[in-house]
Image: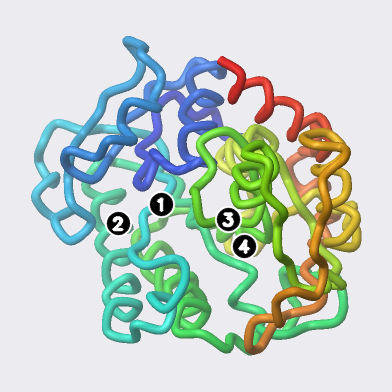
């Protein structure tokens, strides 16, 4: 039975999906407690609304919020240290992230939350050659992927002890406004709009991009209707060759620009198929993506014109 969510706590909410989810929760009439890194410049991306309460707290200090007067129905945990580059194999940091996730569950309990939704990753699966399902066997290759998998399992167990409904959403590939500067989409837009020539791998992978606003709606739907213990891969469910995505972006941003495919090698342990099977997520929650890749790029280009 769907659960009416009137208030939610979000950690790591200044990232692309996080900001989109804050906006989506406000649109649905929820009160939002936005837990952010102290003095983060990205706090400015959050909407100015009487329904949004910014709480500045470091990821290692969630225990300080126990008894702080925060009460909510649900909790979404995005916060994570070192999510890209060499930091993904900083094993000591990644192990701490597992503990921080358990700290988030304990904070959820202290604040009266009945639902906990965690942000997992496709990195939990390792290298696969078929669309990813919740029950697809995992074999993570990086410290980041190992830690995400452990965090999902540990947080599920702790939520079970506390009587909190738990869902784990494994994000495949997302993009949109407020995207991080290190992503492929940001690199392509920055390079093409400045008149440069992007240098790329052969881009033969099968990828599955989902726009941030669609991802946010998926998380909100899981909050309300997600099945306890479920693991949901999150993508568009309509994968394409990465080269097709790159060419579509080029055609919208700088149609005459050259693209140097094959100028770079694939990353070590590069997965060649990153596609989500979203059938279970749709069946459980009714969610389905609305924004095409091309329309998402148009939104990003429009924002850069302002």
Q: Position of residue 135 (x, y in %)?
A: 74, 75
The crowding category of the residue bearing disc 1, from other C-alpha atoms within 10 Å (few below 14, some 14 to 19, many at least 20), is: many
Q: CA distance from mark 1 to mark 2?
A: 7 Å
Q: Is residue 57 left or right of residue 159?
A: left
| Marks 2, 3: nearer the viewer | 3
Q: Quadrant of residue 38?
A: top left
Q: Is residue 208 left or right of residue 93?
A: right
Circles 3 and 4, Cβ within 8 Å, touching? The answer is no
Q: Residue at x 23, y 45 (%)?
A: 37
Circles 1 and 2, Cβ within 8 Å, touching? The answer is yes
Which residue does the numbered mark 4 point to in the structure image? 170
Which disc, if any, is residue 183?
3
The crowding category of the residue bearing disc 2, from other C-alpha atoms within 10 Å (few below 14, some 14 to 19, many at least 20), is: many
Q: Residue at x 44, y 46 (%)?
A: 76
Q: Is residue 61 left or right of residue 186?
A: left
The crowding category of the residue bearing disc 3, from other C-alpha atoms within 10 Å (few below 14, some 14 to 19, many at least 20), is: few
Q: Among all residues in the image, which is located at the extreme top? A: 50
Which residue does the numbered mark 2 point to in the structure image? 104
The crowding category of the residue bearing disc 4, from other C-alpha atoms within 10 Å (few below 14, some 14 to 19, many at least 20), is: many
Circles 2 and 4, Cβ within 8 Å, touching? The answer is no
Q: Position of residue 98 (x, y in %)?
A: 34, 73
In the image, residue 47 above or below residue 85: above
Which disc, if any, is residue 77?
1
């Amino acid at each position: 039975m769907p659960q009416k969510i009137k208030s939610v706590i979000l950690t790591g909410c200044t990232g692309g999906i996080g900001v989109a989810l804050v906006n989506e929760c406000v649109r649905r009439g929820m009160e939002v407690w936005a837990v952010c890194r102290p003095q983060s410049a990205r706090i400015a991306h959050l909407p100015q609304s009487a329904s949004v309460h910014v709480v500045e707290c470091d990821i290692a200090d969630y225990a300080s919020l126990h008894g702080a007067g925060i009460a909510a129905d649900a909790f979404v945990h995005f916060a994570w240290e070192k999510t890209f580059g060499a930091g993904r194999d900083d094993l000591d940091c990644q192990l701490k992230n597992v503990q921080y996730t358990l700290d988030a569950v304990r904070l959820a309990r202290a604040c009266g939350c009945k639902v906990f939704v965690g942000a997992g990753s496709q990195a939990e699966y390792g290298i696969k050659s078929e669309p990813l399902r919740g029950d697809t066997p995992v074999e993570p290759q990086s410290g980041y992927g190992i830690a995400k998998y452990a965090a999902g399992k540990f947080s599920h167990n702790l939520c079970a002890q506390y009587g909190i409904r738990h869902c784990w959403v494994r994000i495949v590939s997302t993009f949109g406004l407020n995207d991080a500067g290190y992503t492929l989409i940001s690199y392509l837009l920055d390079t093409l709009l400045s008149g440069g020539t992007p240098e790329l791998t052969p881009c033969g992978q099968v990828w599955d991009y989902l726009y941030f606003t669609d991802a946010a709606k998926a998380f909100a739907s899981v909050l309300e209707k997600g099945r306890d213990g479920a693991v949901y891969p999150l993508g568009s469910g309509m994968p394409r060759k990465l080269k097709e995505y790159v060419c579509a972006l080029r055609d919208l941003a700088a149609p005459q620009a050259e693209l140097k495919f094959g100028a770079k090698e694939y990353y070590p342990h590069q997965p060649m198929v990153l596609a989500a099977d979203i059938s279970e997520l749709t069946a459980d929650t009714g969610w389905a993506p609305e924004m095409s890749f091309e329309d998402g790029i148009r939104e990003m280009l429009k924002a850069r014109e302002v």
